[in-house]
Image: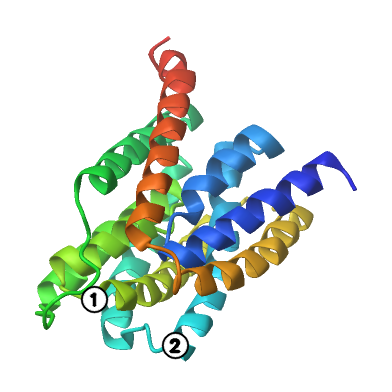
Amino acid sequence: MTEALLISIAVGFAIGVTLGCLGGGGSILTVPALIYLIGQTPQLAVTTSLAVVGVNSALGVYLHRAHGTLNPRVALLFGGAGMIASYTAAGLSKHLPPTLLLVAFAALMLVVSLIMLRRRIPEQAEEPELSLIKIVGTGAGVGLLTGILGVGGGFLIVPALVMLLGLPMHQAVGTSLLVITMNSAAGFLGHLDGIHLDMSVIAAFIAAGMIGTFAGTRLNRYLPAQRLRQGFAVFVLLLGIFLLFDNLPKLLA
């Protein structure tokens, strides 16, 4: 078994666990792993990430739906707006310098990690006020990031669903996975033109990720979500700092 395959399996499993347990965060791991460990270009890594995260999220949707932790109406409205924005924005990344993409990705990681560390997401919420404008507007914003940077947006979607729309935390996780699936599919289609994908890497990531997603979905019912989220936020913060220090000097040179 080659080193690249072993790395793909290990990282794919970690991505699956993160998606199943937290309802997002998979792409934060996928894009840097594909660039720094597998050796893909940023544009190729973005497209591959969308395929991997999208398929694993779809499995998570199925598993969470069985547990009743999914709000289909919110997911379809939020995800529908995101799909349009994601597909439209996908073409933009092809015209941006690879280093600029990585710096933007790192900056997003820093912002999100700090938000996750500073703001506590309640486990339960009152009856949600499902404002159509809020749902569509927030969904379009997440879709924009998905298309340009290759992020499924779960680390943004879950806080948005709870803090802005008022969904209970357990419902936000499953709903987030459906939104990620939709956004990733649209972003992936928007990136396909002129991209030659490495199907062996995609297959390894997805296969290991499916096992991880199953494990993460079960862990979600037993482990304290707040502690998991804080630990993940610290990891994202450190990774974002590394990416910024590695790429910002190249961009300014």
Residue at mark 2 to residue at mark 1: CA–CA distance: 14 Å
- Residue in the picture at 45% in, 87% down: 65
- Residue in the picture at 26% in, 81% down: 74
User: Where 149 falls versus 245 (above or below)?
Assistant: below
User: Where 68 falls versus 8 (above or below)?
Assistant: below
Horizontal side of 172 relative to 208 (left or right) equals left
Evaluate whether residue 223 shows in this view.
yes
Identify residue for label 2. Answer: 67
Find residue 244 and report its horizontal and vertical position in percent: 41, 25
Amino acid type, label 2: His
Residue 215 placement: quadrant: bottom right
Residue 251 placement: quadrant: top left
Sequence-earlier tag: 2 or 1: 2
Horizontal side of 4 relative to 147 (left or right) equals right
For label 1, count other residues whose C-alpha is less than 10 Å away and answer few (under 14), some (14-19) or many (20+): many
Find residue 14 and report its horizontal and vertical position in percent: 60, 54
Horizontal side of 59 relative to 129 (left or right) equals right
Find residue 50 and report its horizontal and vertical position in percent: 53, 58
Identify residue for label 1. Answer: 168
User: Where 243 falls versus 206 (above or below)?
Assistant: above
Camera-side residue: 218 or 201?
Answer: 218
